[in-house]
Amino acid sequence: MKRYPAFLLAVVVLFAANNGLAWGPDGHKTVCRIAYQLLDDPQRAEVDRLTKAYKLPNKLTHYTSFPEACTFADRARGNASGKVKGWTRFAKFSNWHFLNVPRTVKHVAATNCTANDCVVHGIEFHGSQLADLTLGDQKRAEGLLFLGHWVGDIHQPLHISYEDDKGGNSVKVHSSFFTQTNLHSVWDGGFIAHDEGAGTDAWIAFADRLKSGITAAQQTQWLAVTAPIDWADESYAITITPDVQYCKMTASGDSCNSINGPRNLAAPYQNEFQTDVETRLQQAGVRLAGLLKQDLGK
């Protein structure tokens, strides 16, 4: 059996964790930065305290900021899949990044989350874990990190989709505009990459621009929709929009079926859906802030 250096294994696992699982890292950090900025000073202090208190399984590193920590769930999933020591207990959360529905579904309902094994349950489970003041900092902090991630995931349209094509991961993309090679990854990171511009910290200015564009009326409107299953239905409505090119509704309107062949996407695709992506990131940030205000006990 061929052996690989430990550092190479770590690179492979990290790639697996970020390959089409969720909003890309910048998307998740953007959601959590928006949410963080919408908290008051005591709430931010508690988020900082819990984030820095969380002990990662390797016990060698810890997160220093909440936005960075919101990428933890993908890291945990990748490491659990790779059976990395100390991380395998996170395998039970692997299906909590998304919600698969039958192609005949017109609107997502609670009955579509079977056996409490989807992103809706993840939000409820880890929100309750964060809110339980009888738990120690480690458990509550873990709830915080997962909750931040799940709220981002449920607002990514192709996370509410179909199992047979892995939420668009099996839908090939041919493009000289997008570097991503499948439709799911275009929605995870392709739009954001073009929108935020170049630079390691470009996501910070991007997040701040989105946050500054949120009006008080929008916050009120978005916070009025309190059920995560309804957030999933909002995503699904985008997923099955014909111009997304994910699926095609039958003439009778009873099923959104797969489309044969790769998608040829260019700049007009970015232009058409960039506002939708930005709005979903803003909604996720606002709603995450609402949950944190509720669950932090501050």
Image: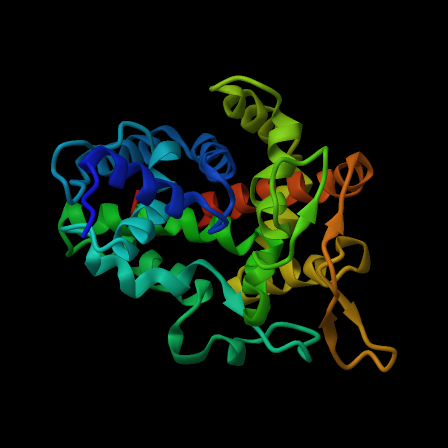
Q: Quadrant of residue 207?
A: top right
**11 left or right, relative to 285:** left
Q: In the rendering, at what x and y percent does residue 134 appear?
A: 15, 56
**9 left or right, relative to 204:** left
Residue sitting at x 46%, y 32%: 33
Q: In the rendering, at what x and y percent does residue 30 appear?
A: 50, 34
**Visible residue check, residue 238:** yes
Q: Nearer the viewer, residue 134 or 71?
A: 71
Looking at the rendered structure, the number of numbered marks drawn on it comes to 0
Determine whether 213 is above or below 121 in the image: above
Residue sitting at x 40%, y 67%: 121
Q: Quadrant of residue 116?
A: bottom left
Q: Nearer the viewer, residue 232 or 87?
A: 87
Q: Quadrant of residue 246?
A: bottom right
Residue sitting at x 54%, y 63%: 166
Q: Nearer the viewer, residue 258 or 44?
A: 258
The residue at the far right in this view is 251
**102 left or right, relative to 68:** right
For the C terminus, the image quarter is top left
Q: In the rendering, at what x and y percent does residue 129 appear?
A: 26, 58
Determine whether 151 is above or below 160 in the image: above
**57 left or right, relative to 110:** left
Residue sitting at x 68%, y 48%: 173
Q: In the rendering, at what x and y percent does residue 208 appear?
A: 56, 24
